[in-house]
Image (spheres, rainbow, N blue to C red):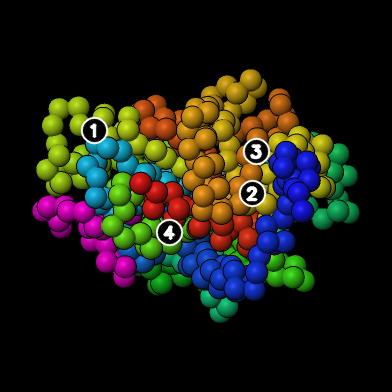
């Protein structure tokens, strides 16, 4: 029978589940079980970096600082201050023939403790926070929160904190006004109803029996912390403590077809790319995986993508592979290709008015390619060359990877950006390639299991390509 004109000409965008056989179905669900388990142990950038390092070592990757010389097939990693990780599998070709880089970020929106966090009011003790990243503040009240991070004492001793994940741990929460007395609050604009200064955690209410003490509840909390961690109030100034939702990653829906979890932006892309590079052996082009920090607050600082630490890592590769010469680093970047792996805002039928449905990403329709991001007239965008987009789509079509080419929201509705332009500025061909999610930056974000597995397949195909 002859192909219909419709089938021949139209770009049919259909659910990936429709073309999923039983075998692939099983693989998708198995993969996502591993993903959810990893997410539950990796809620912060430090935890993700430590777990990524462990996965890498179990798969034969070695610390680049312990390697004198690099040869094709070698697998190395570099951990930057416990908060970002770069991995590489050395290719058969020279580094200056170009790298295949996939970069994602392992930080997620959350509430950070202020440097002087403990106070008492109304005979209750509180932790004062400063939010990290773009959050809708009202979403962070009256949910269970757990405390993760480190406290470094003046003598350098490091204390790791993780309270609220174990069933027997206490959790913490931010209270909200009862509806009975919220007449004024409910008439405020959504963005103003909960003030940043009110994002304070309730942490205790039992007073110390110490006579003459002024703030007895605060004192009792400090006593408990001193017994548990050996710290005094001043030790908070050299800590990095983050409140994240205590929720566990779970399957969503009667069909179990989605994952709902905290931090899928961007640990979804970090996990899938980390898993993919574990499965790469002897690639033609050197495969590089970036797991960076600080993306949610502008990629600044020495663990963010704008720092030169990544350049240093590539310089180390050049050096240890015996390819260093003047301008080698620039040449490597100018010949490299990259997928900037970050989640995309999916079309939400409940909020359809913000999306152009012809250019939106949809759950279960595969990985997203954003040719450009930016706001108001593509401002601030890294706009991928059509030639490179063609190369990437050809790769996906050859490997039967389901993909959709999309844009975040309607024109002038808002927008966003990723680390894409930072690498593009070095000369790398870059396109954003991630996964559509719902409720981005909320304490609980939703993704399709089909897309999660497809991201893993897409990243693997990219690294295997010569
Ligand atoms: Mn992101
Ligand atoms: Mn984000």
Sequence-first tag of 4 and 2: 4
Sequence-first tag of 1 and 3: 1
Front one among 232 and 157: 157
Q: CA distance from mark 1 to mark 3?
A: 32 Å
Sequence-first tag of 4 and 1: 4
Report x, y in % for residue 359.
71, 36
Q: Which residue is mark 3?
A: 406
Q: Which residue is mark 1?
A: 329
Tell me the residue at 43%/49% (across/down).
Answer: 462
Q: Which residue is mark 2?
A: 436
Q: In the drawing, does residue 151 fall left or right of residue 17?
A: left
Task: Find the magenta span and give its range.
Answer: 57-82
Q: Are marks 3 and 4 in contact (CB under 8 Å)?
A: no
Q: CA distance from mark 4 to mark 2?
A: 19 Å
Residue 276 is labelled as: 4
Report x, y in % for residue 339.
46, 42
- Is label 2 or label 3 in front? 3
Front one among 128 and 85: 85
Q: Secondary structure at mark 2?
A: strand
**How many numbered tags mark residues here?**
4
Sequence-first tag of 2 and 3: 3
Please say whether residue 213 is visible from this viewpoint: no
74 within the magenta span: yes
């Amino acid at each position: 029978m002859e192909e219909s004109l419709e089938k021949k000409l139209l770009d049919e965008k259909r659910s990936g589940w429709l073309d999923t056989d039983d075998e692939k179905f099983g693989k998708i669900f198995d993969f996502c079980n591993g993903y959810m388990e990893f997410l539950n142990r990796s809620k912060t950038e430090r935890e993700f970096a430590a777990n990524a390092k462990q996965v890498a070592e179990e798969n034969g990757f070695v610390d680049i600082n312990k390697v004198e010389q690099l040869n094709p097939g070698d697998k190395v990693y570099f951990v930057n201050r416990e908060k970002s990780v770069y991995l590489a599998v050395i290719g058969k070709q020279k580094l200056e023939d170009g790298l295949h880089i996939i970069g994602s970020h392992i930080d997620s929106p959350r509430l950070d403790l202020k440097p002087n966090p403990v106070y008492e009011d109304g005979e209750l003790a509180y932790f004062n926070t400063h939010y990290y990243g773009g959050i809708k503040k009202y979403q962070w009240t009256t949910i269970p929160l757990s405390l993760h991070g480190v406290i470094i004492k003046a003598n350098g001793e490091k204390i790791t904190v993780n309270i609220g994940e174990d069933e027997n741990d206490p959790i913490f929460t931010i209270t909200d006004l009862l509806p009975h007395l919220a007449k004024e609050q409910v008439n405020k604009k959504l963005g103003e109803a909960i003030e940043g200064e009110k994002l304070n955690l309730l942490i205790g209410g039992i007073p110390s029996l110490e006579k003459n003490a002024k703030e007895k509840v605060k004192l009792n909390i400090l006593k408990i912390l001193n017994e548990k961690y050996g710290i005094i109030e001043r030790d908070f100034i050299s800590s990095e403590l983050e409140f994240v939702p205590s929720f566990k990653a779970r399957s969503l829906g009667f069909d179990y077809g989605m994952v709902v979890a905290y931090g899928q932006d961007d640990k979804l892309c970090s996990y899938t790319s980390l898993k993919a590079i574990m499965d790469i052996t002897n690639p033609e082009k050197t495969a590089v995986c970036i797991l960076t920090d600080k993306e949610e607050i502008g990629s600044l600082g020495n663990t963010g993508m704008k720092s030169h630490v990544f350049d240093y890592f590539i310089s180390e590769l050049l050096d240890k592979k015996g390819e260093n010469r003047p301008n080698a680093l620039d040449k490597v970047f100018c010949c490299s290709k990259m997928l900037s792996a970050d989640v995309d805002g999916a079309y939400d039928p409940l909020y359809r008015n913000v999306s152009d449905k012809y250019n939106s990403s949809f759950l279960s329709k595969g990985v997203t390619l954003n040719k450009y991001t930016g706001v108001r007239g593509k401002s601030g965008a890294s706009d991928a060359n059509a030639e490179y987009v063609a190369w990437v789509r050809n790769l996906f079509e050859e490997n039967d990877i389901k993909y959709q080419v999309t844009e975040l929201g309607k024109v002038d509705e808002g927008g966003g950006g990723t680390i894409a332009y930072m690498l593009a500025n070095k000369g790398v061909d870059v396109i954003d390639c991630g996964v559509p999610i719902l409720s981005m930056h909320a304490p609980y974000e939703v993704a399709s299991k089909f897309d999660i597995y497809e991201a893993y397949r897409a990243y693997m195909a990219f690294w295997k390509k010569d």
